């Protein structure tokens, strides 16, 4: 019975109203990009090893990430505008993927920190296109009550794969760096295989769609503000807190405490966001992450390290929410623009978080990160009041419809088993 129950839950999770080609296009594109993003440019283990090999200072390492994020920030808005004008998504994804892979390989031949700055800017510009495009594609292809699970599965798979580069980092820095860059660049390049799927664009449907007003400005601000603040905290965590923790605990311990629970958080977040609406799961994720950070800061890395498990769960929930909320808020004909603004806020938050710690990427003193974590936990709790005031971005009738369908499926299976 337990095996059947587990299989039923898997079927429920993937019972989404989207054709197979469209699902594979979204899933492969998102997973490939996020693995590359988490492993390399966004304070990832491959980028960390690469900058270690150049013997760069902490502030120089921070400048490289800062310039990359600045390029992403500016061009995300441009991409969103172009997507709504052209009403094509897939071509933007494919071109961005190809250019991003090529620029990633260029890092293999850069040995001067000064040359790295313009290369990072170019990488940020070309890499900003793809997430805005597959975000708009998610809004085009999927029903509102299915978006959480689609994105949850993508995020859940990407993060632990990305952090495998940290787990298996070789002792010889130069060889591990070369291998890591080649692997992440190639993984991203492989996602171009989605060209073979030949997914259909919904250009004509978008053109014929009535001008829906989308969310009000007030509601958009109530959701955008917490997302922005959350990613400021994420910028602090990825730039100095995690590198410091990684220097104080075994690699395998950090991976099991962060990467594996993150899978649970992302999958759970996808389910909750589709069945309970966007507000409550996001608030729960923020609260879990905030409490975990506070415990870790008060008890210290050694005594409070176990709290990183709960932090990973909460972080996973909010990450999934931050990737789908723009599809809920956007008018049909402005999905590209909203995703451009959304990813602009995400990269802008990461950028401010990095600047808040002195534009440093690397390990700092344990005393410093304790204060950073305490302030970050306070910031996360400040995200909650606006969400309490906001209307749920997933309409109540959609939530009720989703819950009713779940009950009907379970009742049907119960009858069939009898």
Image (cartoon, helix red, strand yellow):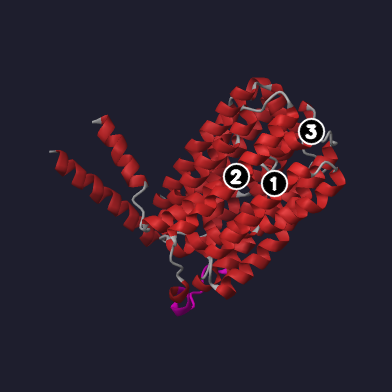
Quick one: label 3 or label 1, which is nearer the N terminus? 3
For residue 326: magenta?
A: no
Q: Which residue is mark 1?
A: 105
Tell me: residue 207, above or below residue 280: below
Residues marked 2 and 3 touching at CB (< 8 Å)? no
- Counting other residues with Cα less than 10 Å from the Cα at mark 3, is it few (<14), some (14-19), or many (20 or more)? some
Residue positioned most to the left: 418
* Residue 228: x %, y % from top left: 66, 53
Q: Which residue is mark 3?
A: 53
Give the distance between the C-alpha atoms of the residues marked 2 and 3, in whole angstroms.
21 Å
* Residue 239: x %, y % from top left: 73, 39
> Looking at the figure, which quarter contains the C terminus?
top left
Q: Which residue is mark 2?
A: 186
Q: Secondary structure at mark 3?
A: helix
* Residue 97: x %, y % from top left: 60, 55
Give the quarter of the image for residue 297: top right
> In the rendered structure, which segment of residues is drawn in magenta?
206-216
Tell me: residue 248, above or below residue 23: above
Q: Residue at x 71, y 58 (%)?
A: 125
Give the distance between the C-alpha atoms of the residues marked 1 and 2, in whole angstroms.
9 Å
Give the quarter of the image for residue 305: top right
Q: Secondary structure at mark 1?
A: helix
């Amino acid at each position: 019975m337990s095996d059947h129950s587990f299989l039923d839950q898997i079927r429920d999770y993937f019972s989404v109203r989207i054709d197979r080609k469209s699902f594979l296009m979204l899933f492969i594109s998102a997973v490939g990009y996020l693995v590359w993003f988490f492993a390399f440019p966004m304070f990832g283990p491959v980028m960390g090893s690469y900058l270690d090999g150049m013997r760069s200072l902490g502030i120089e390492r921070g400048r490289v990430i800062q310039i990359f994020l600045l390029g992403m920030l500016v061009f995300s808005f441009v991409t969103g505008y172009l997507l709504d004008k052209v009403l094509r998504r897939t071509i933007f994804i494919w071109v961005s993927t190809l250019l991003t892979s090529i620029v990633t390989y260029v890092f293999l031949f850069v040995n001067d920190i000064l040359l790295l700055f313009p290369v990072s800017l170019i990488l940020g510009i070309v890499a900003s296109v793809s997430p805005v495009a597959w975000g708009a594609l998610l809004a085009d292809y999927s029903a509102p009550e299915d978006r959480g699970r689609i994105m949850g599965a993508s995020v859940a798979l990407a993060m632990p794969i990305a952090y495998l580069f940290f787990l298996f980092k070789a002792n010889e820095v130069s060889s591990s760096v070369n291998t890591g860059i080649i692997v992440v660049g190639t993984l991203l390049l492989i996602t171009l295989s989605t060209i073979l799927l030949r997914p259909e664009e919904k250009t004509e449907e978008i053109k014929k769609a009535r001008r829906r007003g989308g969310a009000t400005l007030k509601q958009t601000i109530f959701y955008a503000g917490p997302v922005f603040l959350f990613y400021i905290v994420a910028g602090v965590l990825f730039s100095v807190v995690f590198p410091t923790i990684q220097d104080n605990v075994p690699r395998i311990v950090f991976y099991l405490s962060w990467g594996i629970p993150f899978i649970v958080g992302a999958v759970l977040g996808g389910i909750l966001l589709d069945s309970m609406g966007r507000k409550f799961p996001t608030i729960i994720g923020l609260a879990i992450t905030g409490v975990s950070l506070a415990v870790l800061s008060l008890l210290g890395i050694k005594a409070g390290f176990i709290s990183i498990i709960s932090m990973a769960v909460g972080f996973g929930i909010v990450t999934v929410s931050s990737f789908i909320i723009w599809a809920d808020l956007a008018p049909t004909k402005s999905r590209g623009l909203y995703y451009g603004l959304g990813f602009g806020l995400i990269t802008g938050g990461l950028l401010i978080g990095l600047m808040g710690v002195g534009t440093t990427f690397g390990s700092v003193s344990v005393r410093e990160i304790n204060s950073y974590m305490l302030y970050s936990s306070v910031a996360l709790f400040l995200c909650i009041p606006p969400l309490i005031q906001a209307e749920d971005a997933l309409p109540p009738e959609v939530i009720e419809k989703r819950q009713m369908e779940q009950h009907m499926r379970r009742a049907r299976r119960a009858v069939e088993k009898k």
